[in-house]
Each structure stands twice: as structure tokens, then as C-alpha cells.
Image (cartoon, grey):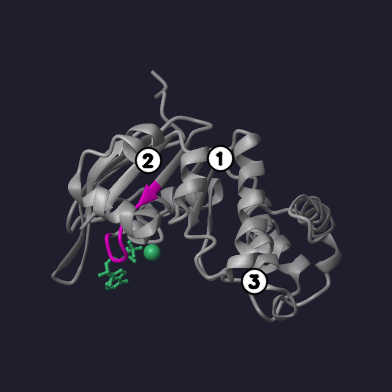
Amino acid sequence: MASEFLIKAQGLQKSFGKHQVLKGVDLAATSQQVVTIIGASGSGKSTLLRCLNLLEIPDSGSLLFDGEEIDFQPGKKNPLMSKWVASVRRQMSMVFQNFNLWSQMTVLENVSLAPIKVLGLTKKQAHERAGRYLDKVGILDKAQDYPARLSGGQQQRCAIARALAMEPKLLLFDEPTSALDPELVGEVLRIIKLLVEEERSMILVTHEIGFAREVSSQVIFLHQGLVEETGTAQQVFNHTVSPRCQKFLASVL
Ligand code: ADP
Ligand code: MG
């Protein structure tokens, strides 16, 4: 039977050396949901996102995505892993805090590269597609510029266009506005809001609590590699149970 979930992670654990960063994290989302992850710096939010799209391979736990499930076992290499990694990378696109654009490529080339290399589009097809998404995020006029010529907000919008150009089933955002000057935050949140209105599935790490309250189907508060509190935005923000979550919210609101 097909799962009702687009993504479902169970018991994800990840250590770096002796430091266990994820201690058994569960997360599940159906299609079109927006899951927001909040938590203090160092709580494991980025590591969790990186484990979901297999930039890091979890030590143990399981991950179901788009109807396929994989188990991670310590010290055991799954023979299907490389196939799985490739398929996950095609279907999940990540937007990073520091944009991670290729500085030696134009905006258009940044957005076209993965559709050419990974999806096998021709250059012409990829450029057409890139143009559509650059237009969507409002920087089509910057297509021939190099990223350094753009403001931080424009660079992040370029990174969002690059993620969209893969036409992924799931978008991951890791603190997409944290590196921006305050006056540039709004233009990036406006684009993310547009994507929410299009009912795209996404997992969003952010400290923008007001925005999270507005868009989230589900909020997860991570504390030291464990889910400390989870529920609807209303539950987590207005009826906070965990004192640690209360303290965290007080510090960012
Ligand atoms: P957050 O995104 O919530 O700030 P991270 O997931 O980035 O937290 O980091 C959680 C902890 O894991 C931190 O203590 C960080 O130093 C550590 N960590 C993250 N990535 C690595 C890595 N590649 N190697 C070693 N330690 C790491
Ligand atoms: Mg982080």
C-alpha cells in the first residue's frame, strides 16, 4: 500500500566522532505540508536536513521518501545506497543559509547547471526553464550577472530559482534569511510564501517565528538532537508545553 507520507524519518541518529548530534529523530510530512524546524544553534537542525537529503548518511534509523524506504544500520553499507542518494537528490532541493551559488558562473548558469547535468536537459531547454524560475523570483533581469553583483536577497532568490529548476517534490530551506540584512529578509520570505500558496511541500528551518506561525502545517522544536516539542503552529507557539521551548521562543520573539 502506498504510504500517505511524502517523507517519513524514524529514529534518525547521526554522530560526528564521539559527538552524537541526532539522537533518534522522527519527522513525517504528507504532500503539500510545510514542516518548520526550530531550535537553538547547535541543536542539530542543519544536520537533520542534511540527513534527509543524504548529504550526510544517518548512522541508524529509516527514511521513507516518495514511496521508497531505506534503513540505515551502523557499519553496514546498503548496496542500494548510491542509487537511493541519486534519486533523493533529484527529488529534494535544498536552499542554504549562505546561498552557495557558484561565483564563477552567471545567475542563468547557476540555475541551469543541475537540470543539464542531473536531469539531462539540453542547454536550450535548461535556459528556458531557468528563465521561467528567475522570472518567478523576480530577478530575470539579472540572468547574465555574476552572483557577486547581486544583493544578498537577490542571491538567495537565485538560489531558490536554482532549487525550483529541478522541479523537486520537496524543498528544504536551511535558515534562508539568517545571512541577510534585515531589510532584505522580506523579499525572500515573500517568495517562500508564494511557494507555500502554490502548495509545495517543504521543510523549513527558520528563526522567523511570525512567518512560521503563518505558514506551518507542523512545527518541530529540536533540543540537543531530540524532538522536544511538536504540533501545529498554534499548539507549539500558543500553548507551548516544554519549558525549554518556551525559553527558546522568548529568546527569538
Ligand atoms: P544547528 O543547525 O541546529 O545549529 P548543526 O546541525 O549545524 O546545528 O550542528 C549540530 C552540532 O553538530 C554542532 O555541535 C556542530 O558543531 C556539529 N556538527 C555539525 N556538522 C558537523 C560535521 N560535519 N562534523 C563535526 N561536527 C559537526
Ligand atoms: Mg544550522
- Magenta span: predominant SS is loop
Q: CA distance from mark 2 to mark 1?
A: 20 Å
Span highlighted in magenta in the image: 37-43
Q: CA distance from mark 1 to mark 3?
A: 26 Å
Vertical relation: 110 (above or below) 243: below
In the image, ligand 1 is in what quadrant? bottom left
The residue tagged 2 is: 219
Q: Quadrant of residue 148?
A: bottom right
Upstream in sequence: badge 2 or badge 1: 1
- Crowd tier of the residue under label 2, counting other residues whose Cα lies within 10 Å: few below 14, some 14–19, many 20 or above: many
Tell me: 193 left or right of 9.
Answer: right
- SS state under label 2: strand
- Amino acid type, mark 2: Val
For the residues bearing labels 1 and 3, Cβ distance under 8 angstroms: no
Residue 165: image location, x then y, percent = 68, 52
Mark 2 residue's CB less than 8 Å from ligand 1: no
Task: Name the quarter where the N terminus is drawn.
Answer: top left
* Residue at 30% in and 47% down: 221
- Residue placed most toward the observer, 136 or 14: 136
Q: Which residue is mark 1?
A: 169
Q: Relative to 109, is 6 on the left or the right?
A: left
Q: Amino acid at mark 3?
A: Gly
Q: Looking at the picture, how far across and down is residue 100, in whole percent?
A: 56, 71
Q: Earlier in the sequence, mark 2 or mark 3?
A: 3
| Residue at 54% across, 62% down | 177
Residue at the disc numbered 3: 152
Visible residue check, residue 11: no
Nearest the viewer among 194 and 6 is: 194
Query: Looking at the image, is mark 1 or mark 3 nearer the viewer?
Result: 3
Q: Earlier in the sequence, mark 1 or mark 3?
A: 3
Q: Nearer the viewer, residue 140 or 243?
A: 243
Q: Position of residue 227 (x, y in %)?
A: 24, 45
